[in-house]
Image (tube, rainbow, N blue to C red):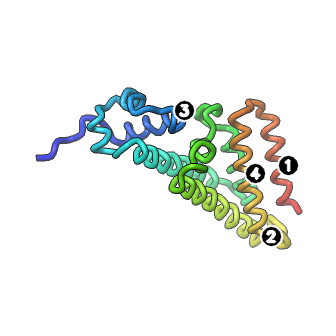
Amino acid sequence: MARTKAFDVDTALRQAMDLFWQQGYEKTSMQNLLDHMGIHRKSLYDTFGDKYALFMQAFDRYQEMRTGEIERRVNAQTSVKAAIRCRFDMLIYREELPSQGCFIINTAVELAVHDEQIAQKVKDHFKQTEQRFYRQILQGQQLGEFSAALDALQIAQYLTNASVGLRVMVKITDDVKKLERIVDTTLKVLEE
């Protein structure tokens, strides 16, 4: 008869995600993970695999949680322009500690240069972000919120790049007014 786990798998994964998010992959040791998650080494290996496999699952969990939260708020907006603004505002007004930055950006900077699998995950995330902006711009053009003369793909790429830069800025400054001005300037491209 199989034994039941003495810990909640979702909670343990969230704890691992939080620790990787705070410290990064390289700085986080297996002992750090075991202590933070409150589980035994065998349980970690049996449930999640090795440190790398656990990190990949933590990356996926962060992306799933953050994307879900953003999409819920974006979908509640009354206009496409407000929805795009919401995407940027959610980068500034975060519930977690802004100094932790974005798990995905942190991963891109720390590991993507050295690890093909992680680099692909980061690229896929940025491509999904670009596609969301692209669909929103097309929708805004169809609804008459944005000029039909805008190149939707170019603007989507620009907004994706701007959102990456903003995620870095959020990590290094607590000047919310400055961040809001950056977003205001960025979104002027939609007024052309």
For label 4, the residue is 162
Residue 33 image position (x, y, % from top left): 40, 32
Q: Nearer the viewer, residue 83 or 20?
A: 20
CA distance separating discs 1 and 2: 18 Å
CA distance separating discs 4 and 3: 23 Å
Q: Earlier in the sequence, mark 4 or mark 2?
A: 2
Q: Is residue 145 left or right of residue 3?
A: right
- Using the image, tell me which numbered label, if any, was put on residue 185: 1
Residue 129 image position (x, y, % from top left): 64, 58
Judge depth for marks 3 and 1 and give the one in front.
3
Q: Quadrant of residue 81?
A: bottom right
Which residue sits at x=27%, y=44%? 46
How many other residues sit within 10 Å of disc 2, few (<14), some (14-19) or many (≥20)? Answer: few
Image: 30 above or below 89? above
For label 2, the residue is 151
CA distance separating discs 4 and 1: 10 Å
- Using the image, tell me which numbered label, if any, was put on residue 53: none
Query: In this view of the protein, can residue 173 be seen by the observer?
Result: yes
Amino acid carrying mark 3 in the image? Gln
Image: 179 above or below 189? above
CA distance separating discs 3 and 1: 30 Å
Q: Is residue 100 left or right of residue 13?
A: right
Q: Earlier in the sequence, mark 3 or mark 2?
A: 3
Judge depth for marks 4 and 1 and give the one in front.
4
**Count the marks: how many?**
4
Image: 132 above or below 26? below
Q: Quadrant of residue 131?
A: bottom right
For label 3, the residue is 22
Q: Are marks 3 and 2 in contact (CB under 8 Å)?
A: no
